[in-house]
Amino acid sequence: MSRFWNSLVSKLEPYVPGEQPRVQNLIKLNTNEHPYGPSPKVLAAIAGQTNDNLRLYPDPTAQELREVIARRFGLTAAHVFVGNGSDEVLGHAFHALLKHEAPILFPDITYSFYPVYCGLYEIAYKAIALDEEFKIRVQDYLPDGQAKAGGIIFPNPNAPTGIAQPLTQIERVIAGNPDIVVVVDEAYVDFGAQTAAGLIARYPNLLVVHTMSKAYSLAGLRVGFALGHPDLIQGLDRVKNSFNSYPLDRLALAGAQAAVEDQIYFEQARDAVVRSREALTRDLQSLGFVVLPSAANFIFVRHPAHTGESLASALRARHILVRHFKLPRISNHLRITIGTDEQCNQLVAACREILK
Ligand code: PMP
């Protein structure tokens, strides 16, 4: 190993994504993809790209897509930043907006990418325990609850619990910390939580981050965006331009724009997932599972009589993939993505067999 390895790189703990299996015939309920494809208009927009389009570089400002997104939220393009999936957008936010003298705050348990970004950008952090019901305790994020912070980030709904905070509570955190940036990661917000985007006009310290991987069913296209005061967006732009000044390729720009413009399809597909979530929750509860209240496209469950690991491997043996985290407080839980009704029924049947 070269001596350079011993520097920063050897200390980095990389993010470990959920498994993307190569074998076919698995019911894949492990990485929160949407069970239905994106709007047919997305495919048409991608297929409509011409030879000449692909010969030329894309728009480095992604102006049209930013305008379409802005309109949906009653904002202007100056309030919108786009990137290759919200993981990239979040990376830029950590790099540009959260690096301060004091440690940043996020919940313990939350999206496991946050500590990875902290390692990458050498940001100190303090992970604040959730309460006994796995909820974020808002008062812990107010200046008198903790020492002065260098920034705050949390998902709403939280992951992998799926529990949402009401907007009034989120506003308390933003209003209570006017001197630092508060990032609300709304990857799953469309499945049942309230977006904080409407607060942007009042709070220049708020950055709201969205993905098109979940409710828009475009995980394969890699599109995410941030909404915030134009000063925050400029901060993200500065970091982005230092890496790769083209935020998205032409296929992603065309596909994402078509998806946002087809709100009717978006709402129908999203509502179908929400209905399946409620049905799956009831079915698993009837088998004795404890299911946390979810506002996302997944549920977080445990069964009092089984370990998470044994359930995950028994399901895997039945060709069903779910997510198990080997973290102390949640090692008995499984995170299950909402699939089609047929997939959910197969999951319930498999659980019934395992629990016999
Ligand atoms: N935030 C949260 C809370 C997530 O669970 C995910 C998905 N793993 C992301 C952001 C990133 O999503 P993407 O990069 O696909 O936009």
Image: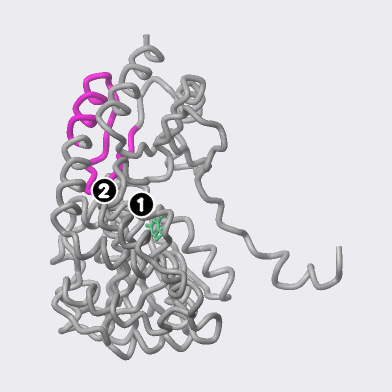
Q: How is the image coloured?
A: one colour
Residue 295 position, x and y percent, is: 22, 48
| Ligand number 1: quarter of image | bottom left
Establish whether ligand 1 lies closer than 8 Å to the Cβ of label 2: no
Q: Residue shown at 30%/57% (left/top)?
A: 44
Q: Is residue 13 left or right of residue 56?
A: right
Residue that carries the numbered disc 2 in the rendered image? 296
Please state which of residues 182 and 65 is positioned toward the viewer in this rendering: 65
Q: Is residue 101 visible?
A: no
Which quadrant holds residue 64? bottom left
Which quadrant holds residue 149? bottom left
Q: CA distance from mark 1 to mark 2?
A: 9 Å
Residue type at mark 1? Answer: Ala
Q: Is residue 166 visible?
A: yes
Q: Residue shown at 45%/38% (left/top)?
A: 323
Outermost residue, top direction? 356
Residue type at mark 2? Answer: Ala
